[in-house]
Image (spheres, rainbow, N blue to C red):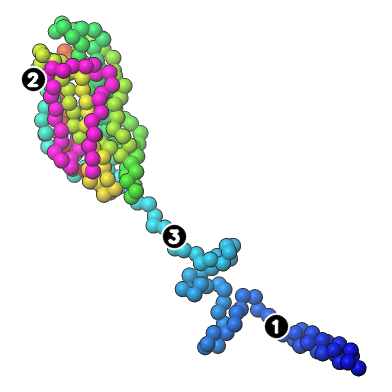
Amino acid sequence: MRLAWVVASVLTSVVALAGCTFQRGVFNDDANGNNAHDDAASDGRPIDAASDGRPIDAAADATTFCHVGVASTTGIDRGRVGGNGGGDNFPALVCANAADRIVGIALKMGDQNNDFGGRSAQGIRIACAPVTVNSAGTGTTGTITTYEVLGLGTFGWAPSTWTPLTQCKPGWIMSGLNTHTSNNASFFVDSTIYCSQIGPTGLVIGTEAIYVTGSLNENQGSDTVQCNTGEIVVRVTSRTGAGLDSVNLWCTTPTCS
């Protein structure tokens, strides 16, 4: 009789369970009688069904970009680098694409001593490219396009050979130039460009000097022009005769779009 009673009790429990309905993800009722479902976290954020049940965080802020422009396409003349010989050249060396900035130069150096007793640059080439800086401060320089001006090459300034392009770092733009005219004040050699780093908001945040590879060495007649603080070079005018005599740097402030 005792065994029969135990079996009957078990069968009664099984029958009772069979009559129940279960719902996935439903927990105990809260104090208000509402069920707490697992498709939302306690703070209202959704649950990732493919994860281990942790709430999904909001997406990180999207990266923004500063496409570096200029306040003026003509700029202000900040001075001449080099000697006083030769004649003015027109038009100026500028980037034909309005979105491009000047990011470097090359010089066309004489292959032999000229009639003044030394080697010197016959011409200059500027490098233009779009410059972009992201919100983290990482700069990018796009495809390079070049523009150049040459002297006549007489009196031994030619034949001549272009130096490699000396270029600012990605996200940096040219802001100055140093050269040496030698003791006769007629040469254009041993040159250095100044490059300025552009920050995420379009402001200049640093400047460095880079020697123009292949422009020879000279310690006489050093001459330098740099843009004012916070400015970059927007165009270059030049004077030439047999060779390159000088350049003027026209500067403006960068902008961000």
Q: Quadrant of residue 12?
A: bottom right
The CA distance from mark 3 to mark 2 is 60 Å
* Residue 223 is one of the magenta-drawn residues: yes
**Chain part drawn in magenta:** 205-234
In this view, the residue in front, 166 or 124, is: 166
Task: Identify the secondary structure beneath mark 3.
Answer: loop
Sequence-wise first label, 3 or 1: 1
Please state the horizontal and vertical placement of residue 147, each as a whole percent of the image: 26, 26
For image coordinates 33% across by 37% down, the residue present is: 170
Sequence-wise first label, 1 or 2: 1
Outermost residue on the left side: it is 84
Residue 84 is labelled as: 2
How would you rate the neighbour count of disc 1 (Cα within 10 Å): few for under 14, some for 14-19, many for 20 or more?
few
Residue 59 is labelled as: 3
Give the residue type at disc 3.
Answer: Ala
Outermost residue on the right side: it is 1
Q: Quadrant of residue 106?
A: top left
